[in-house]
Amino acid sequence: MGKKSKNPGKAKSSETAASPAVAYPSDGPSEEELNCLQTSSSSLQSKLDQLTSFAAANDRKGFVENFVPLALTPEDTQGYLEDLTTADEADGQWRNLISEIAAIAAGKGGNNIEGDQVTNAVFFFEHPLLEQCDREVSFVCTNGEWRAEG
């Protein structure tokens, strides 16, 4: 039937103990990690992640309601939403906008972040879809709510 061990009091180590974890020395952060420049503000990062989630769900209304400046009138907010939904260039504008927000959230293509990142932040970055197109997006925090600056 089965083989008997020549040393019955000693079990095979591979049967009773898990293999030890293998550790590899790190060669440091990857080039991609080095090229990321994210905000140091957890509340702003949370807002950017929220906007990215709206974008991933193609929820333009939710995105606009959480993106536009708080001082924007309801009529202007509705007009901006219409620009992103029904205007002739709506799909292109939406695609460019959400790619910019996703890039800012991930820190990709970021060149600099100005501002204290407590009450304001200005992101300078390369547009993720348009070659040689430098962009600037500003956010302000009012009463704990981050919004695009008008």
Image (spheres, grey):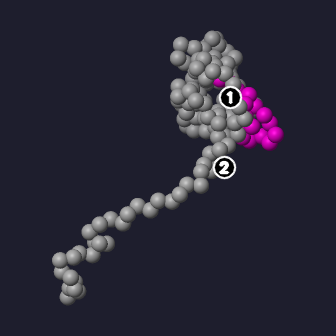
Distance of label 1 from label 2 (alpha carbons): 19 Å
Query: 57 left or right of 17?
Result: right
Work out whether residue 17 or residue 39 is closer to the camera in this orientation and state it. Answer: 17
> Is residue 127 located in the magenta-colored stretch of the structure?
yes
Is any atom of residue 78 visible in this view? Answer: no
Q: Is residue 5 above or below residue 110?
A: below
Neighbours of disc 2 within 10 Å: few (<14), some (14-19), many (20+): few
What percent of the width, then of the height, locates residue 38?
61, 34
Please report whichever mark, 1 or 2, sits nearer to the chain's N-terminal start. 2
Callout 1: SS: strand
Q: Start and end of the magenta stretch?
A: 121-137
Q: Is residue 91 above or below residue 115?
A: below
Q: Which residue is mark 1?
A: 113
Number of numbered discs on residues: 2
Is any atom of residue 137 visible in this view? Answer: yes
Residue 133 found in image quarter: top right
- Mark 1: amino acid: Ile
Q: Is residue 148 above or below residue 128?
A: above
Viewport quadrant of the C terminus: top right
Q: Which residue sits furthest bottom? A: 1
Q: Is residue 18 above or below residue 65?
A: below
Q: Which residue sits furthest left? A: 9
Residue 8 found in image quarter: bottom left
The disc at residue 60 is: none
Residue at image location 27% in from the left, 75% down from the top: 12
Neighbours of disc 1 within 10 Å: few (<14), some (14-19), many (20+): many
> Is residue 43 located in the magenta-colored stretch of the structure?
no
Q: Which residue is mark 2?
A: 31
What percent of the width, then of the height, locates residue 137?
70, 26
Work out whether residue 77 or residue 140 is closer to the camera in this orientation and state it. Answer: 140
Callout 2: SS: helix
Q: Which residue sits furthest right? A: 132
